[in-house]
Amino acid sequence: MVTKMSNTTERPDGKDENKVEIQKTLNLLSAMSLTVGCIIGSGVFISPKGVLIYTGSVGLNLVIWTLCGLISAGGSLCYIELATVVRESGGEWAYIKEGLGGAPAFLAAWMSSTLIASSSAAICLSSSDYLLSPFFTCGVPALISKLTAVLMIFLIIVISTSIKVSTKILNILFAMKVLALVLIIVGGIYALFTKGTAGLSNSFEGTSEEGWRIALAFYSGLWAYEGWNMANYVTEEVKNPKKTMPAAILGSLLLVTCLYLLVNTAYYVVLTKQEVLESNAVAVDWAQRLVGSWSGILALIISLSMFGSTLSSFYGSSRVLMAVAREGHTVQLLSMVSVGDSSPLISIYVRGALSMAFCAIGDIGNLIDFFSFTSWLFYALSFISLIILRARRRHLPPNKDIFQVPIIIPVVMILVAVYLIVVPVIANPKLPFLYAAIFMLGGLVFYFPFVYCKIKFKWFDQVTLFFQLLCQVGIPSRNL
């Protein structure tokens, strides 16, 4: 039997002091730190090469980066409305569940729990490469890189078990991320006046005109913007979400888009197009060309930036596992939170274990394609859910607590998502796309017997009780 910790001792304010509740702790700064912290990770430091490979020119490369910011902003506006309509943590899972039902929502959660873990593994691998690059002139050995990445994930798990500690560290690393980009921008301005423009001349020479290549360029660019929806995963913990969410998400995206454009321009002021294509760590090569031996300082700051991105991702995605379990779509143990500060301990531990596993088998290029293809499939389902939920409310009086976007925005976002999903698969099929499809269909094997048919094993209640007492966790009440 699972205990719910329900002794009813009343406080003077009428609240049950023994009830485990999700706390509303995120203000505007914290929500922005979470969003920017998750967006600015490895993407802007490794994606420039990926975008350039598929666009073929520096000019189209910069256009793609701008369009990626606009696409992310459009998605954010849709997600703001969804967050004010469905005031529940869980992101795409919660929205798709309300709009399209249990099976598609389960698949969204099924993929999200693993895909975000794979992206965290990729980011930590990149972070370890940047951290160790000053000590290995011929490249960081793969085994050492993987072991360092695993240690980073372990440290992130420890930090994530405390909401107060993790939010404070996120705020600090938020400043570190912006500092890393500002240093590159300032260095680019200095180089512009002292060294000329190495890679900006004839900027549209070699531009690709193939649709599938442009779609894959968007995959690399949008990878750098991933995290624009992270604040939606923790809606229940945001103070005054109707006002805080729009300001946090749109403010974060405006800041990030401007920084990304300036950083990419700074790269090409110092490096030529060919040098970027040949680089495995663009920012480090840029710094070595500009400041020589001092490039190690920038490598450390970039590594901390990536660390902060993974911490942000842990903070949000562990809430997805908690929300899914709370609805009975997976084991109840994952829905439980710490009786101390309401952090979803079990979900954090599971999330960390998955990330460590992906570190052992990770390939950054394939992970980006795998992650982007599947992510945009479920983004499309979320945008469709928005239209369905809007249609269901059409006979209801206006609700002042709901943020509503022009209907053209979700329609355009659906078309963008279809383009990003369909064109690469038809024109340039890859194994990561096949793996994603097989993995999604595999989720149905778990959904129908254990969720739809509600098959349960009585002995697992004893396992749940054991870990509940061991980790001091309880089932949270809803706090919307």
Image (cartoon, grey):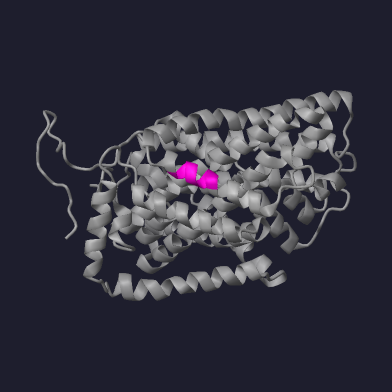
- 104 and 340: which is toward the camera: 340
* Quadrant location of the N terminus in the rendered image: bottom left
Q: Residue at x 58, y 58 (%)?
A: 360
Question: What is the x, y in percent for residue 157?
Answer: 44, 45
Question: What is the x, y in percent for residue 145?
Answer: 64, 49
* Quadrant location of the C terminus in the rendered image: top left
Question: Is 121 left or right of 283, judged from the image as shown?
Answer: left
- 78 and 442: which is toward the camera: 442
Query: In the figure, 394 relative to 159: above or below?
Result: below
- What is the span of residues highlighted in magenta in the rendered image? 151-157
Q: Residue at x 30, y 53 (%)?
A: 335
**Residue 155 magenta-highlighted:** yes
Question: Is 364 left or right of 395, judged from the image as shown?
Answer: right
Question: What is the x, y in percent for residue 266?
Answer: 77, 33
Question: What is the x, y in percent for residue 247?
Answer: 47, 33
**Residue 232 magenta-highlighted:** no
Q: Quadrant of residue 177?
A: top right
